[in-house]
Image (cartoon, grey):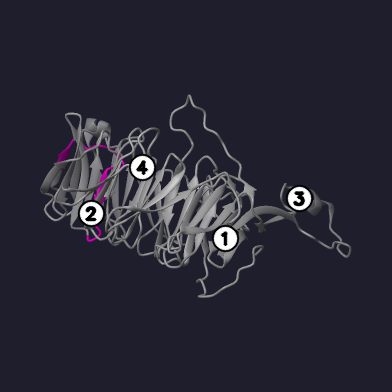
Amino acid sequence: MEFTEAYKQTGPCCFSPNARYVAVAVDYRLMIRDTLSFKVVQLFSCLDKISYIEWALDSEYILCGLYKRPMIQAWSLTQPEWTCKIDEGPAGIAYARWSPDSRHILTTSEFQLRLTVWSLVNTACVHVQWPKHGSKGVSFTKDGKFAAICTRRDCKDYINLLSCHSWEIMGVFAVDTLDMTDIQWSPDDSAIVIWDSPLEYKVLIYSPDGRCLFKYQAYESGLGVKSVSWSPCGQFLAVGSYDQMLRVLNHLTWKTFAEFMHLSTVRAPCCAAVFKEVDEPLQLDMSGLCLDDDFMRGSDAPGRHFKVRYEVMEVPITFPFQKPPADKPNPKQGIGLLSWSNDSQYICTRNDSMPTALWIWDIRHLELAAILVQKDPIRAAAWDPISTRLVLCTGSSHLYMWTPSGAYCVSNPLPQFSITDLKWNSDGSCLLLKDKESFCCAAVPLLPESSDYSSDE
């Protein structure tokens, strides 16, 4: 892998959908860099510090959320002189997002008073009263024709279906939830999944015309659903719960066909490979070297003489387990991270009670494929959008990768760079790696069809 130099950032960074650009917030400035040369191709100055950025799907426009004002500014890459500013006045702006046509911006006001659809074509706007959430509760169909928006009035949750062409309300129906958490269209646009707050275990499948197709409730007592995700193929729905279990439903009968436990101790029989991150001192023969005092003083940094690698462990193995305090809200337990591979064959999970372990499940064979045990809690994990390859980071200077062929570690050559977050670009050729005040990119080689990776690369 090849790494770029480190560049300054003070906020969000993200690739454009066409993978040609990377947008970087540096205080009140928005920098657009080319992903090949990393030269600045556009520089926009906003009115305040940038809190949030989002590309339009056509990669021609980009919006910046200035939530301290609160205000939204949008910019055009093809017409740098074009500007757009959205200010809701006293209502404020809690969140903003693009519509699928890249010509409308949806903003949610503070205290969820209203959701407004702003047109960049004719400056018209449409209001939807009482949106349920600020940053959640809005989902678009894959073809971009319809939007489902969660609303709440008279202590009851509703779904508003809007046409993304005219922004007229096509239908409204009530849903059987106490306090709806979020909503997602299925990848084939045939169904909508809704799940309730953690206090009530309830997953509901609705058709677009408002019919409840299925109601799923795994148990009644205890905290309920923590994470939900459709598989890219649309045939499976994964539900992660506070009881530290992953359940997978099929799209034909909506019945559970797989239940995966996340136990603190894994025992035989277990066909999964368990990879544990270990330190390994560098074995250097320095008998024939003559080093001056300045070099020796500069090499006293901790960890300089160590590299990391994965060691294949035998079962039984016990993972570090953190029992959450019973007197604090939002306990760190249950399936907090849930992500499908691009081919829908694998799904990775993290049980927040065991934050250093990443579990990889094989849906085709309904078994545990691998466990990655890290030294530090896992910050982020993301699948390659093109190949079956998983990348994760833990806040260290290393990247960790898994493929069906094995797992391996990659060291970041940049000094004092701790990888706290990562993102793929859309063609799987580049990774964006974030540190606290800087970022870099890494060119990722294409994955061979059959490759045997060493665990200490």
What type is the residue that disc 4 sits on? Ala
What type is the residue that disc 1 sits on? Cys
> Mark 2 vs mark 1: which is more N-terminal?
2
What type is the residue that disc 3 sits on? Gly
Q: CA distance from mark 3 to mark 4?
A: 57 Å
Q: Which residue is mark 2?
A: 191
> Mark 1 vs mark 4: which is more N-terminal?
4
Q: Is residue 4 visible?
A: no
What type is the residue that disc 2 sits on? Ala
Q: CA distance from mark 1 to mark 4?
A: 27 Å
- 227 relative to 355 in the view: left or right: left
Q: Secondary structure at mark 2?
A: loop
Q: CA distance from mark 2 to mark 1?
A: 36 Å
The vertical placement of 13 against 38, above or below, is above
Q: Is residue 132 magenta?
A: yes
- 188 relative to 426 in the view: left or right: left
> Mark 2 vs mark 4: which is more N-terminal?
2
Q: Secondary structure at mark 3?
A: helix
> Mark 2 vs mark 3: which is more N-terminal?
2
Q: At which x and y percent is residue 330?
A: 43, 32
- 440 relative to 304 in the view: left or right: left
Q: CA distance from mark 2 to mark 3?
A: 60 Å
> Mark 3 vs mark 1: which is more N-terminal?
1
Q: Which residue is mark 3?
A: 298
Q: Are marks 3 and 1 in contact (CB under 8 Å)?
A: no
Q: Which residue is mark 1?
A: 271
Q: Secondary structure at mark 4?
A: loop
Q: Which residues are magenta?
A: 127-143
**Depth-wise, is mark 2 or mark 3 nearer the camera?**
2
Q: At which x and y percent is residue 183?
A: 27, 46
